[in-house]
Amino acid sequence: MPSNMPRPPTTTSKPWYNYITLELLLHILSRSIFHPAIVLIFYLCIVAVPPLHHRHPLANPTLYYVSFLLFVRSLALLNARITYGPVRTVSWEDEVVVVTGGATGLGRCLVEMLLVMKKGVRVAVLDVQEADETARGWMRSGGEFEGRLWWGCIDVRNSAAVRIMAGRIKEELGQPTILINNAAAGVVGLPLIPEDYSASLSVQDATKTITVNTISHFITLSAFLGDLVEHKAGATIVTISSLLAHLSPCRLSDYSASKAALSSLHACLTHEIASNASKEVRERVKTILVEPGMIQTQLFADITKVPWYSNFFGPVLEVNEIAKTIIEKISRGESGVIRMPFYSKCMPVYAVMPGSVQKFMRWFSGIDTAIVPRKKKI
């Protein structure tokens, strides 16, 4: 691959024991004793051995277990179909993807993966940062990626600028079909209550966080939603929220509030689409909510400290992992919610647990002491 072409992002090097996690164990189990095809092979092996064959003591229980696993999977598929409707057909050669906050972190990883892995897709980036040397090289390349990457250097909090850029994207790349709302402000990490060692969260800091993390989503939806719902091939809207929308840790009041608002915005948008008078809108416009745990980006770099055992239960996610999962779900034309790693899938249950259990879990996870106390940057 020529040096001026994007390459799939590499993962951060970690000690071998950091890969031994609850997530890994569950991944192995889901593809072994909890997978109906694997268990069925085990059943066939049992009945193939003489002299007992089908009379083997394990034969019938194994077959019943296979039936149970198939029943559970069928219920899951039926539930997804009833909840989100039929999938839409995604043809990447005809897709125009708009990514906000695509200069760094998860957004940049999504942009690179799309360009490398999905032939023909066109990607527009909206970010307050200008395109770096690498991105400029991709855009002026006369080869495979010519005309496939477009860069708009704007503040997504500026409604007028976003609308202008939306018009330019439609004119130069085509009508958008996928919107990935990923823009996020840096984490302030200051408490509401003033303390000796740290300043308290200012109104200016909170306003910036909520404006970038939440209001910008309303602005981009206002600019792009009309074209998205009118596209004959359908569209997908991806909202990048956070698991912290449900947990609200100490020192992250502004960040958690902004992400909780995002999750609510996604829910309202999804229900409005499901209630739309047009059958085509209901069936072809898909929404994906992404609520990951901590991701290995600059957003939380150098400001967190968690217990030594936390990596087993809640490993820090590589941007590659979450980006790949998002792209795969878009490719399948599905709606839904992406929560990673495994413990994040338990958040709906956490909300109805007794207060004493919730308090123990917060203490055990160290979530309320995870943000390192620091002085406010001037």
Image (cartoon, rainbow, N blue to C red):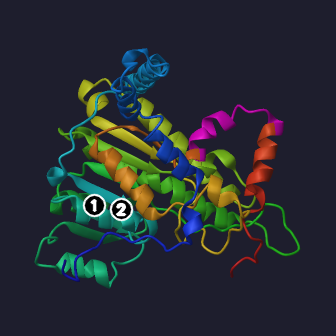
Depth check: 323 or 196 in front? 323
Can residue 248 be seen here? The reply is yes
> Looking at the image, which residue sits at the far left?
142
Residue 110 image label:
2
Q: Is residue 329 magenta?
A: no
| Residue 134, x across and y down, in percent | 30, 81
Q: Residues within 10 Å of mark 1 (few under 14, many from 20)?
A: many
**46 left or right of 92 in image:** right
The answer to if 355 sits in the magenta stretch is yes
The amino acid type found where label 1 is placed reads: Leu
Q: Residue at x 70, y 56 (%)?
A: 253
Can residue 158 be seen from the camera position used here? Answer: no
Of residue 2 and residue 135, the one placed in the foreground of this image is: 2
- Position of the C terminus, as image quadrant, is bottom right
> What is the x, y in percent for residue 30?
47, 40
Q: Nearer the viewer, residue 57 or 152?
A: 57
* Residue drawn at point x = 17 percent, y = 38 percent: 232
Q: How far apart are the two marked residues, 2 and 1, measured between alpha carbons?
A: 6 Å
Question: Quick one: quadrant of the N terminus?
Answer: bottom left
Q: In the rendered image, which quarter is residue 305 located in?
A: bottom right
| Vertical placement of residue 237 versus 33, above or below | below
Q: Mark on residue 114?
A: 1
Q: Position of residue 322 (x, y in %)?
A: 44, 56
- Secondary structure beneath dot 1 equals helix
Q: Amino acid at mark 2?
A: Leu
Secondary element at image label 2: helix
- Please determine whether, in this image, residue 228 is positioned above or below residue 368: above
Span highlighted in magenta in the image: 343-356
Residue 98 screen position, x and y as percent: 31, 58
Q: On the picture, is 21 further left or further right than 155?
A: right
Outermost residue, right side? 196
